Amino acid sequence: WGTATLLETNSPEYTRGARIASDGSGYGVTWYQNDGARYSIYASIYDATTSNWGAITLLETDSSNAWQPQIASNGSGYGVTWYQHNGVAYDVLANLYDTATGSWGTAAILDTNTSNAWGVQIASNGRGYGVTWYQDNGAGYDIFANIYVSGAWDTARLLEFSAEDALYPQIASNGEGY
């Protein structure tokens, strides 16, 4: 083990929920922290060739609270997903990091419903990403998923609907699908 490195130094409040993933040579870490007004999602990338952590990056720019990020790697970048309040309900969002360009993209909303979504999870099959969550249907909770393939997010899909609640989905890949 090397020497511990403090990544976050500018928060007057709380830093929570750190998650880490590896692309096979470096690492990506994400967390959420309170700046005194709201919770936001941050990330930093460790470059194994330079043995340094990159700049701390704010992954979203909304003025509402963002919570519980998750991170995965496809081997050539990272995907981070979280849920964030839109003023009416919680949406599922994601942002992608490309190791080749060394940059984060723009946060994308993954769900299409107008009700609260929580419990986000992310995995990669080595090429794209799969994200799952549960969402309020007015009478209970259903499981949804979205996938990132060929450079774009697909449409959110309902995976489970029943009279009973479905909560806390997980996602994994065998290298081909999810």
Image (cartoon, helix red, strand yellow):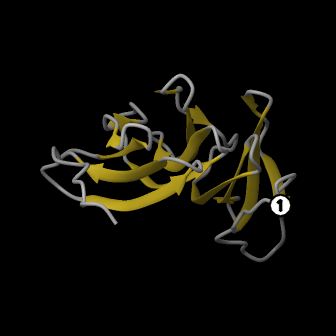
Q: Is residue 140 above or below residue 177?
A: below
| Residue 6 drawn at (x, y percent) | 22, 53
| Residue 10 drawn at (x, y percent) | 16, 44
Which amino acid lies under the numbered mark 1 shown in the image of this protein? Asn
Residue 174 falls in image quadrant: bottom right
Residue extending farthest to the right is 176
| Residue 111 drawn at (x, y percent) | 67, 43
| Residue 177 drawn at (x, y percent) | 86, 53
> Number of numbered discs present?
1
- For image coordinates 67% across by 72% down, the residue present is 167
Task: Decide if residue 70 is in sight here.
Answer: no
The residue tagged with tag 1: helix, strand or loop?
Answer: loop
Residue 142 falls in image quadrant: bottom right
Q: What residue is disc 1 on? A: 174
Residue extending farthest to the front is 49
Q: Is residue 50 above or below residue 178?
A: above
**The C terminus sits in image quarter:** bottom right
**The N terminus sits in image quarter:** bottom left
Residue 133 vs residue 149, the one in the foreground: 149
Does residue 41 appear to the left or right of 162 in the view shown? left
Does residue 171 appear to the left or right of 102 in the view shown? right
Judge the density around disc 1: few (<14), some (14-19), many (≥20) Cα neighbours within 10 Å: few
- For image coordinates 71% across by 59% down, the residue present is 137
